[in-house]
Image (cartoon, rainbow, N blue to C red):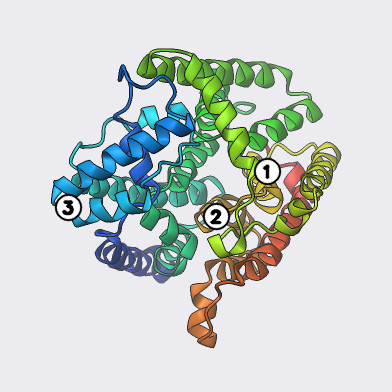
Amino acid sequence: MSFRRFILPALAAIAALYALSVTWRNHERAAGLDFYIYFVNAQLAARDDIDNIYAPEVQSRIGEEYFERAQRSGSELRKYDATRRRRLDNVSSPFLYTTLRWVSRDYERALRQYHALVLAAFIAGVLLIARRVRLSWAAALFLLAALLLWYRGFEADLRVGNVNSLQLLMIGVLLNVAPGFSRASGGRAEARPYVAGAVTGLLIAFKPNLVLIALLVLFARVASHEWIRLRREVAGAAFGGAIALLAAAINYGSFAVWLQWLTAAAEFFGRLQTRAERNVAPALALHEIGWGYAVAAVLIAIACFAIWKSKTRDDALIAGIAIVIYLLSAPVVWLHYMVLALPLAIALMRNRATAVVSVIALAMIAEEPFELLFRVPVYPNDAWHIAPALIALFVCGIWRMSDAHETAAAL
């Protein structure tokens, strides 16, 4: 008993701390291909010579300006990233850029700050989701250690300086805010749906690739006739979205920045990145012939049928399935997006049967365990590992959602 209660968690904590130290040592000085864009755009607000940060002319002109600044900076990291981003590729939401105005104007310091933030967000996100689905501390910490050491999706997110780990943290917060409304009483419990809705609104405004979470959760509330909770979550989401819209508008001096972003985002999804560019989208071939979104429609229909039949209120499963639908059907899926496969994978670990599938799927997505075992590089065949793993997670998620025991699991 003492082994399971004290010694095993202690060993898991040691493993997690070791993995943390190795990860920081290996990646502290990594360049920031995506972070460089965030760094530049965080400094463009209120400049009189910029009317539209998403305009092609502005992206070229500002890219050249900051390239010249980098050459005079004396920072090799900044020179390296500025050379790779000599023309900016601004497609992220203005709210995302707004949230990063706090980083240092010294590029190397800002990059170190952001690496620390991404690492902390990933750790907190994994542990919050594990807590939500009631994994033991030992299991959660051993899982965290393995992910830090061998999960290439997180490694990619950290090394390019993207935001998927920040999204993971927000999902973890969302799932821990949501539980308890139907069982508890009092003002605190009544406030939870408002807070969960607000977090959802901010999450979508930050990066709208997770909008399916809101749609499937809304459908689940309708299916289970949770009208009061639904109204409060919608009100909270409207408030969170309004805060994001207002913050970016104040930052850039106009609400027009949102319309400009919508045009840029539409153009981005109109151009398909190739496998050579490390686009690991499972549905890429179907998008190339115009059938890609049919995959999303079919998967959404399956999820909605399972939700309606089970009347499930398990937000961890619903959110995880929504994200995996996106990963399976989107035209552009970068390797660092695989951080977003973790919510469903972790949710499936609370059941022994699906836990086995989840661990195998994560090992396939991680890539490094396969390369260590077979001494064969996964690239450029990433999608052949990732697609079946995501499909397995989706199937297990639907099966657990349809299980009578899941139906009874109230949040």
Residue at left offset 20%, top offset 57%? 76
Report the residue marked by disc 1.
322
- Front in this rendered view, residue 269 or 303: 269
Tell me the mark number nearer the camera, choosing from 3 and 1: 3
Residue at left offset 34%, top offset 40%? 63
- C-alpha span from label 3 to label 2: 28 Å
- C-alpha span from label 1 to label 2: 17 Å
Pointer 3 local density, CA inside 10 Å: few below 14, some 14–19, many at least 20? few
Disc 1 on helix, strand or loop?
Answer: helix
Coordinates of residue 43 in the picture (x, y in percent): 29, 29
Coordinates of residue 130 in the picture (x, y in percent): 50, 51
Amino acid type, label 3: Ser
Amino acid type, label 1: Ala
Q: Is residue 393 above or below residue 255?
A: below
Pointer 1 local density, CA inside 10 Å: few below 14, some 14–19, many at least 20? many
Residue at left offset 76%, top offset 42%? 407
Q: Is residue 353 above or below residue 175?
A: below
Using residue 142 as the reference point, say whether residue 300 is left or right of it.
right
* Chain-order first, disc 3 or disc 1: 3
Coordinates of residue 261 in the picture (x, y in percent): 53, 27
Disc 2 on helix, strand or loop?
Answer: loop
Tell me the mark number nearer the camera, choosing from 3 and 2: 3
Disc 3 on helix, strand or loop?
Answer: loop
Q: Which mark is residue 334?
A: 2
Q: Which mark is residue 75?
A: 3
Using residue 286 as the reference point, say whether residue 32 is left or right of it.
left
Amino acid type, label 2: Trp
Quarter of the figure with residue 276: bottom right
- Front in this rendered view, residue 9 or 193: 193
Residue at left offset 45%, top offset 64%? 147
* Chain-order first, disc 1 or disc 2: 1
Coordinates of residue 194 in the picture (x, y in percent): 55, 20
